[in-house]
Amino acid sequence: MTDTVAQTGVANAKAAPDTMAWDSGLRRLMMIYLPLGCFVLILLFPFYWMAITSFKPNAELMNYKAHNPFWISSPTLAHIKHLLFDTAYPRWLKTTMLVAIGSTTLSLIASTLAAYAIERLRFRGSPYVGLGIYLAYLVPPSILFIPLATVVVQFGLFDSPLALILVYPTFLVPFCTWLLIGYFKSIPYELEECALVDGATRLQILRRITLPLAVPGLISAGIFSFTLSWNEFIYALAFIQSGANKTVPVAILTELVTGDVYQWGALMAGSLLGSLPVAVFYSLFVDYYVSSLTGAVKE
Amino acid sequence: MSVTTLSSSALTQRQPNWLVRLFDYKPFLIVMCLAPAIGLLTVFLTYPLGLGIWLAFTDTTIGRRGVYVGLENFQYLLTDPLWWNAVFYSVVYTGIATFGKFALGFWLALLLNNHFPFKSLLRAIILLPWIVPTVLSALAFWWIYDPQFSIISYLLVDVLHWRSSNIDFLGSPWPARFSLIAANIWRGIPFVAISLLAGLQTISPSLYEAAMLDGASAWQRFRYITFPMMMPILAIVMTFSIIFTFTDFQLVYAITRGGPGNSTHLLATLAFQRGIAGGELGEGAAIAVSMIPFLVFATLFSYFGLARRKWQQGEGND
């Protein structure tokens, strides 16, 4: 009698962890994987749709009854060919690349020097200069573009990519400076003191000691600036008029959207090609990117 | 003899040319280091900001230097139904989109804070909507919202048979407004989620262990540990998010350009339409300047509203 009770008790005790494991496994599935799957599906669907549209022939694009819209029956490169050979797309890509690289270089130089001065050459009021630069980041381009357009015209830079290279640092420099201040802070000051004792000049210290140690910060700031200037829209829309000098985002919207019948295939192909460089660049440096994003927030 | 020559040569070595010495002179070096950044920001940010406020009080148009007209532009705006409409939609857009972004983004951050395989890959994929140029993903949304070939309509009508006719996403005011808000939320979730995830990872696990020993439920752990610990970072991220949602331009310009019937104009797109496309620089600048009070208010509200708890605690400790 007691034996059986003990046995069933043991059996129960054995069964309990199993059901609990199963229960928690199902729970995990419902509470974590299912919502996560929905998030990923929704966040990625527009890109899937963009990609699939750019390889679909027009007949399939306009007929959902005969073809399953989620798949391509006969993929075509016609839209991409049209984009590359019948429009100025390669030129837009080149302009965008030039503007992005130019403004990134300019803001990296300016913000490295500024961050070094604020963090390492401490002087009276250096925290206020840092705060001022940070506040500049809070001024959105939407309230600046009209007066900036008149400034650009005054300088004779209207319709020139140089205007964009000079203007983009207004939102890149505050961010990069703030990021680099954080990086310089993490480098021990003793290293610089040693170099000072050894008779190095300040510029030598910056070039030989501080900069090599801040390379991860420089990479983060660089990719962040590159993607931000690649994506910039409102200044490029307001300051560039001639079709040849436009950047990719502006050109697709203003040059490819023509008439009443939209060429969705070409539009999506243009969007896909315009997104690829940033996406590739991003995937190469994804860890730097995430750390710069979160680092800047935490500062 | 030999000793003196040696010392004099050492002296010349120790005193390099004046240029190197100048660059080692600290005040000069500080000025030189700050000059590029401060110069760029002054010429292309501070000066235009002041110029914009000045332009708002003039009747400048493209190609004509305006004269001071006092508050005329603002008086005109107050009687302009389009401006009121844009203010209304900007507030609605910012309010709903911010709420959606933070609710969903916080949820996503909590999900990502669990342990599962391919976590870093997933984190990388999730940021994609934020990396890709907004205008280009907006074009994809425009195509998704197409009246005839919308994939959402196809799903609801032909696959699920929930509706009998296609949804007209962008053809009438309220559906168009909500379609834009949905696109904005889609774009904003990754940034919020990744920033909040960084905040979540700084919370010490021992707090949760202590609460579990005390018998706190999952909801109580969230309500009394996660939420209060996240307040400071939430305040910062929300301030940024509100500023850049309120002044959003790209999404609306790419998808509806303010239509149908000017119902989806934000203040930024209205300023562009009047100032650059219409050539009325003075009036456009006035619309842009009219955003500033809203921005200041929203910033103070989100910053002090959310950081208040911390501030009160700090005062209590003193």
Image (cartoon, coloured by chain):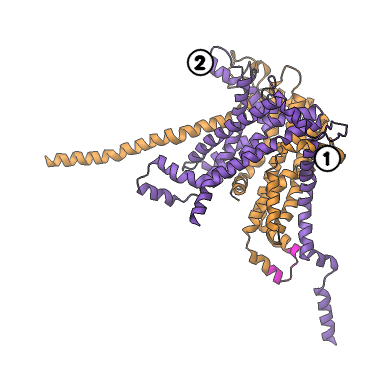
Residue depicted at x 77% and y 26%: A255
The answer to whether any part of residue A247 appears in the image is no
Residue depicted at x 87% and y 39%: A154
Q: Identify residue for label 1.
A: A151
Q: How many other residues sit within 10 Å of disc 2, few (<14), some (14-19) or many (≥20)?
A: few
Q: Main secondary structure of the magenta part?
A: helix
Whether residue B24 sits left or right of residue B129 in the image: it is right
Q: How many other residues sit within 10 Å of disc 1, few (<14), some (14-19) or many (≥20)?
A: some
* Marker disc for residue B162: 2
Which secondary structure lies at badge 1?
helix
- The chain holding disc 2 is B
Q: Which chain is orange?
A: A
Mark 2–mark 1 Cα distance, whole angstroms, equals 55 Å
Q: Which of A166/A286 is in front? A: A166
Residue with the most extreme bottom position: B1
Residue A193 horizontal/vertical position (percent):
67, 68
Residue depicted at x 55% and y 46%: B307
Whether residue B84 sits left or right of residue B230 in the image: it is right
Q: Which of B72/B113 is in front? A: B72
Residue A188 horizontal/vertical position (percent):
62, 63
Task: Check whether the beta carbons of the residues at disc 2 and disc 1 lie within 8 A of each other.
Answer: no
Q: Is residue A29 magenta?
A: no
Q: Amino acid at mark 2?
A: Trp
The answer to whether any part of residue A41 appears in the image is yes
The quarter of the displayed image where residue A81 is located: top right
Q: Amino acid at mark 1?
A: Val
Q: Which residues are magenta?
A: A194-204
Q: Which chain is purple?
A: B
Whether residue A6 sits left or right of residue B265 in the image: it is left
Residue A214 horizontal/vertical position (percent):
66, 56
